[in-house]
Image (tube, rainbow, N blue to C red):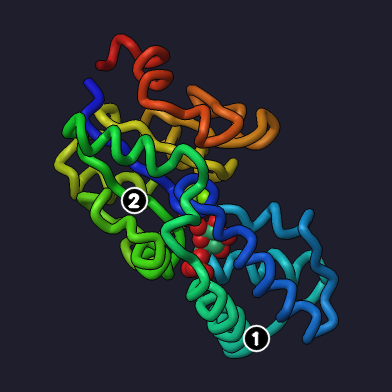
């Protein structure tokens, strides 16, 4: 039976992909690297360092560890500055509604984000109160597609993977949820999250009613 829900942050609760894009774009322009929205799409759900390595690989550049660290920090300073503009109006349409609904029905709710800035984003949104557990980029060592972050959330809620539904917008995030034995809900296009057990184009379509109708034997 389903007792808990685990939500990814960027692309599910709010769209911080834009702020990530702007910060990487700024760094890339400064360094003369090729970077655009198409490249940015590949960074969905992957860690900051893996994102930097992806951009460098795309540009056929290799750098030593100290320089990588310095550049990742530089990007993060720009990103954190942009996060200050996030307000409670920046929930993705439908996100606040399902979180409220889950709270009123007494389900456990966890965040399962790769971001080390997840707490700051939740604070800016005023969303901390919707979560029993916050799993973020500081919680586990392995990043998606490893299921570690979702297993962390389930364990902290005192639940087994099969008792939880994971919401994810990233291809690697759905891989992680499926590998961990979770029920998965993909948010986004078929070509990105078509391997989820259930898929919606956007969070606005992902109501608790629809979820319960699809996973009806589990409620
Ligand atoms: P940070 P999610 C992910 O968030 C983003 O989708 C990804 O683009 C980003 O690189 C990653 O967080 C790490 O973020 O630099 O803040 O630690 O989708 O897992 O909530
Ligand atoms: Mg995401």
* Residue bearing the label numbered 2: 111
Residue at image position (18%, 44%) is 157
Q: From the image, which quarter does the C terminus lie in?
A: top left
Mark 1 vs mark 2: which is more N-terminal? 1
Q: Residue 82's spot in the image, x, y percent? A: 56, 75
| Image vertical order of residue 212 relative to residue 180, above or below | above
In this picture, residue 31 sits left or right of residue 19: right
Q: Residue 16's spot in the image, x, y percent? A: 55, 60
The answer to which of 129 and 71 lies nearer the viewer is 129
In this picture, residue 36 sits left or right of residue 156: right
- The disc at residue 132 is none
Residue at image position (79%, 76%) is 61
> Could you classify mark 2 by the number of other residues whose Cα lies within 10 Å: few (under 14), some (14-19), or many (20 or more)?
many
| Image vertical order of residue 157 relative to residue 50, above or below | above
The answer to which of 136 and 147 lies nearer the viewer is 136
In this picture, residue 113 sits left or right of residue 190: left
CA separation in Å, label 1 and label 2: 33 Å
Q: From the image, which quarter does the N terminus lie in?
A: top left
Q: Residue 76's spot in the image, x, y percent? A: 54, 78
* Residue bearing the label numbered 1: 64
| Image vertical order of residue 1 relative to residue 105, above or below | above
In this picture, residue 136 sits left or right of residue 157: right
Disc 2 is placed on an element classified as strand
Q: Residue 86's spot in the image, x, y percent? A: 49, 66
Q: For residue 142, what is the image quadrant?
A: bottom left
Mark 2 Cβ inside 8 Å of ligand 1: yes
Q: For residue 17, what is the image quadrant?
A: bottom right
Mark 1 Cβ inside 8 Å of ligand 1: no
């Amino acid at each position: 039976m389903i007792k808990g829900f685990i939500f990814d942050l960027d692309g599910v609760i709010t769209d911080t992909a834009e702020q990530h894009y702007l910060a990487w774009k700024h760094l890339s322009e400064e360094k003369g690297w090729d970077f655009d929205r198409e490249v940015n799409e590949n960074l969905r759900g992957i860690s900051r360092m893996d994102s930097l390595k992806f951009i460098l690989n795309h540009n056929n550049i290799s750098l030593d560890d100290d320089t990588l660290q310095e550049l990742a920090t530089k990007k993060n300073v720009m990103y954190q500055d942009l996060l200050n503009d996030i307000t409670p109006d920046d929930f993705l349409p439908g996100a606040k509604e399902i979180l409220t609904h889950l709270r009123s029905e007494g389900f456990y709710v966890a965040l399962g984000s790769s971001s080390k800035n997840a707490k700051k984003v939740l604070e800016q949104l005023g969303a901390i109160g919707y979560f029993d557990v916050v799993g973020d980029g500081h919680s586990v060592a392995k990043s998606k597609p490893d299921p570690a972050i979702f297993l962390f959330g389930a364990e902290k809620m005192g639940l087994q993977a099969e008792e939880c539904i994971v919401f994810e917008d990233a291809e690697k995030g759905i891989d992680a949820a499926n590998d961990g034995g979770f029920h998965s809900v993909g948010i986004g296009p078929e070509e990105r999250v078509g391997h989820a057990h259930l898929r919606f184009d956007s969070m606005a379509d992902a109501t608790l009613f629809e979820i319960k109708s699809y996973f009806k034997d589990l409620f």
